[in-house]
Structure formats: C-alpha cells, structure tokens
Image (cartoon, helix red, strand yellow):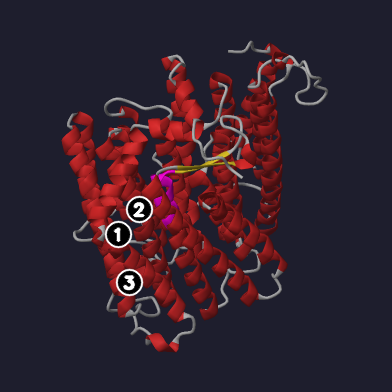
Amino acid sequence: MTLALVALPVLVPLFAAGLSLIVSASTDRQRTVTLTALALVLADAIALLVVVERDGTIVVRAGDWAPPIGIVLVADLLAAMLLALAVLVALAVLLFAVGQDNADRGPGITVPYHPSYLVLVAGITLAFLAGDLFNLFVAFEMLLSASYVLITLDAGPDRVRAGMTYVITSLTSSLLFLTALGLVYSAAGTVNLADLAVQAERLPPGLRTALSLMLLVVFGIKAAVVPLHFWLPDSYPTAPAPITAVFAALLTKVGVYAMVRTESLVFPRDGAWWVAAVLAVATMLVGILGAIAQDDINRLLSFTLVSHVGFMIFGLALSDIAGLTGTILYILHHITAQATLFLVAGLIVNAAGTAELSRMERGEGARRVHGVTGLLFLVGGLSMAGVPPFSGFIAKFALLRAAAAHGGVAAWLLAAAALVTSVLTLYAMVRVWRGAFSPGLGEPLPLRRRPGVLLTMSAAVAMTLTGLGLAAAAGPLASMGERAATELVRPGGYRDAVLVGEREGP
Amino acid sequence: MTSLDVTMALVVGGLFAAGVHLLLQRSLMRIVLGIILLGHGANLLLLEAGGPLGEPPITGGGPEVDVEAYSDPLPQAMALTAIVITFGVTTFLLALSHRSWRLTGHDEVQNDPEDRRIGDVAERADDDPTPHLPSDDRGDAG
C-alpha cells in the first residue's frame, strides 16, 4: 500500500496524459481528466506526507532490482513535503487556467495544453522522488520537454524568440548533466544517490570538487542562479500567466531541490561553503537590482524570482541543519508566494490591457483590477518582501537566525545581502502596486459580470490561503523542516533506507 | 578506475569542441547542429564511462560465466535512453527553428526587445538628468 503511494504521483499523471490525448476532441472531457488526475495525485501526496512523517523514509524498487543497479524511488520527508505542495500549486494553477480560458479563448490553452501539463507534473513528481542521478536526468527531460511545448504553444514571433532562448539553454544544461553523469559513473561506478554518497568518500578530493561543481553548474542553470540566470527573465514573461506561474513556482525549485539533494548527500561539507555563499549574494543582489530596472510587470516578477533563488542557496551555503531548515522553509514559502504573484499579475495585465507599469501609472491602461485582487497582491507582495506575519517573514527569519548562529564572514555577508534584498523587494512590490492601482486607470468591472472569474479568483484565493496557512502553521512546519534538514545533513538514514532497506518493491 | 581509449577521448573532445563552437554562432541552424554534436559527444562519453569493451552482456551466458569479461551494461542502457531523449528534443528544436524561420524570414537569433529598451533608458539617463521611460518606440506588447 505504501509502495503504491510513492509510485502513483508519477504514474497517474502519465496515464492521464495518454487518456487526455484520446479524449482531445472535447475540451470538457480533457479538463475532467486533468482535474481528476491532479486531485488524485494531491490526495496521494498528502497521504504520502502523513505516512512518511509517521514511519520515516519509504523506498520503492522498480522491477524489484536491488539498488544500486535498479531504479529506486525514495520518499523522504523533504521530498514528501515538496511533493504535496507542488501538486497543490499545480492544481490551483490549472483551475486558474481553465477559468481564464472560459473568460476569453486567448492563446495558450489549446488541445496539447492538458497532456503537456500532466507530463510536466509527472516530471516534477519524479524529480522529487528520484533516487538516482540518471532517473533525475530523465525526470528533468520529462518536465523540460513538456515545458518546451507549453512555452511555445500557439506562439507568435515574440514567444518563439523567447521559447528559443529557453529551449537552447535548457538543452545545453541537459547535455552538461549527461556529461556530468558519464563522469560520475566512470569515477564512482554508480549513479544511485545513496551508493554514490558512500563511493564519493573514497574519491580524491580534487575529483570530488570537480564533480560537485559540475553538478552545481547543471542545477544552477535550471534554478537560475546568477550568473546562469540570463535565460529566465527573457523567456518566462512571454508565456500566458498560468504557464508562467507554474514554471516560476515549480521548475526553478526542482533545480534547487536537486542541488540541495546532491550537494548535501553526496558532497557533504563542514562549515560554510564559500562558492555557494558568493553565488547566493550575487543572485540576491543582481536579481533584485534587475527587478527594479524593469518596466514590464512580468519581467519584474521574473527578476524577483531570480533574486529569491539566492535565499535558497543562502541556507545551502551554510551547510548546517539550521541553514537547510531555512532553505526548506524558503522553498515552501516561495512556491506559494511566487505562484500567487504571477497569477495576480495575469489578472492585472488582463484588466489594464498592458503589462507596462509606466503606462499604467500614466493611466494609459484600460482599467484597474478589482479590490479583492489587490488584497491578494498585497498579501503575496508583503510575504515576498518578508513583512511579518506572512510566510516570507518566517522563512527569512529562519535563515537569518541560522546565519547568526553560524557566525563567520560568509554568514554575515549573506545576512546583509538578504536584508538589503528584502528591502528592495518591498520597493519593487510598491512599484507594481502604484502601477496596478494608479488612479488614472478606469473603474474595475464588478466581479459578477465576468465569465470564468469564479475559477480564476478561487484559484488565486486558494494560493493566498495556502501561503497564510504556511505562516499560521509556522511552528509545526519549522520543526518538520528541521527534521527534514537533519535527515539531509546526517544522511546515514537515507543511505541505509535505500541500500539495506527491508521493504521490497512490487 | 578504467584505462582510457585515446581515440575515443579525441573523438569526444572533438565533438564537444565543435559543438560548443557551433552553439556560440548567431545562426539557428548552426546552433541546432551544435546541440546535435554535443549530444553525440555526451552519449559517447557515457558509453566510454562503462570501461573497456568486453563480451556482450547477458546474452550467451552459460552456467559458468566470467562476469569480469562482460561489458558494463548499465552505461549502455543509460546511453540508449539518452539517445532517444536527445533525438526527440532535437526534432522539437528543428520544428521550432522552422517556425521561427517562417515567422521572421531568417534564421538569426534575435535580441530581446525589452532588454534593449531598458539598456537605451539607462544610456539616455546618463545624458539626461530627469529619466523617463519611452513609451512609443516599443514594437511589441510583451
């Protein structure tokens, strides 16, 4: 029973993707298939989280091949937490997309949308559960192939240009990943993460560093870490709001997750990791300064996304339990907050008829968004900036406390950069606020008069409530995050569960 | 540690060098070719990671099989998977390049208009003490 819990989040969306192609003649049936599949996966992911929280890591051996040779799916506490939240966000964004599609049959939601979206979700869940590097590569390819289709769906010249940047950059990073895999295999003779953790200890230090840095570059491209971030603000903003929201919320986090997993499990470090510290400071500052320079609301949010990836690297750079707890809390907070902001930005652009803040401020747009949407933006924006009592404050507080407890130049440098970035994030959010609620814009339409508004609004409200829920459950969440971080830093449990676990797969 | 085949090392190195060179060109067709060459290089490298050649694995094994004489099957399985993936994605990339050529009439990689616009604003702000964003010289709606 528990074994099926681990496998189903990958299998159900893939099966549904096939089914969705079969019923592609009817939009309603396609929607039913996607919604049912995602609801099932969400129920499964929540059950998995409960079971893993109670009983510890679950390992599934595909085809009963024993590790390190066979494929294993590993659900530990970190994977289960991220899985549950990721599927929740995917479901909310899907509701938004369906609602927006009801409102106007704009570009983006055509027949290939639903199957691609399901494959994307399957890739994301597989990436969280993958127990070996090659399976992680396959998961990345699944979600990237689906994202290539989504970002260029029904595209005009603009989006083809942006999609081209995205596809070529992602492909290059995938080929680098493949190269790194070959090198890891020839050095250690295994790609199973748990086995690799054992083998890597025997490698010469120079080789270890080289492999670790190579994987850092590969996942750095996916996670948009400065200086490998350039592709993100060029490509994400051109896609329709629901697609941008799910990419921004989940795809970069999968990169960060892979980075945290490999670096903490296979290449554990004592003390601060300077390379990551420098990257984190650069990512935070360059990202947020880039955001301030932008005029397009989606580009501004994309640069904010880049900047806040730095916070997640912050915790990784400290490489201790407190730091990784901060990283985990930050990933959870950022998935919800960033998805909310992109969804609300979609509503703002829809209402104003332009994405340019300077034009909105001059009152050249059509009309303002409704007050409820404004409230949603306020919660998301303040949470991003780290204003208490929202989830961003809790995650940032955990990181800053970890830095203070850690001490040393690297930690204080990180803390200073984080504070500056938070203040500048607030400034960026105020800029969006001034544009979107500029008095020059026309009065908003009443909520009732627009088709599809119920779905889009309820999706945005659900995301905001999830964010508030994260803040309200800060205590239990922090202790859970700390347990997950402890598992990461002392990975004996992970290794033993995979290599000598008694649970046999079907 | 396995011994290294110099010919294969040269081939893989050559493929990577040529691939990266083509990837840095402005023409989309060359970039696609660069990706293909890089993919070949990476797949060969993966195959080489299995060590020196040996007996075909799994097939033809009697009761007394010398496991050491086998080729390592795992990198072969991984290379096969990777070949299928690069093949599929390359096809998509070709289709995308074709669409880009149909839409723009040439196969050059284009600049990002918004990037250039913000660059222009920064340059103008250096000359003009009161910066403002231009609104009418913008070609697209993002």
* Label 2, residues with CA under 10 Å away: few <14, some 14-19, many ≥20: many
Q: Earlier in the sequence, mark 1 or mark 3?
A: 3
Q: Which mark is residue B131?
A: none
Q: CA distance from mark 1 to mark 2?
A: 8 Å
In this view of the protein, which residue sits in the foreground, A268 or A479? A479
Hey, what amino acid is under mark 2?
A: Leu
Q: Quadrant of residue A256?
A: top left
Relative to residue A492, is residue B50 depicted above or below?
Answer: above
Question: Would you name the residue on which mark 3 appears?
Answer: A436
Q: Which mark is residue A470?
A: 1
Residue A188 visible? The answer is: yes
Q: Earlier in the sequence, mark 3 or mark 2?
A: 2
Q: Quadrant of residue B71?
A: top right
In this view of the protein, which residue sits in the foreground, B128 or A346? A346
Question: Left or right of A25: which side holds A234?
Answer: left
Marks 3/2 in contact by CB < 8 Å: the verdict is no
Question: Would you name the residue on which mark 2 appears?
Answer: A332
Relative to residue A485, is residue A164 depicted above or below?
Answer: below
Q: Give the residues drawn in magenta, as a range.
A: A76-84
Q: CA distance from mark 3 to mark 2?
A: 27 Å
Residue B24 position within the rendered picture, expressed as x and y whole percent measured from the top left: 58, 35
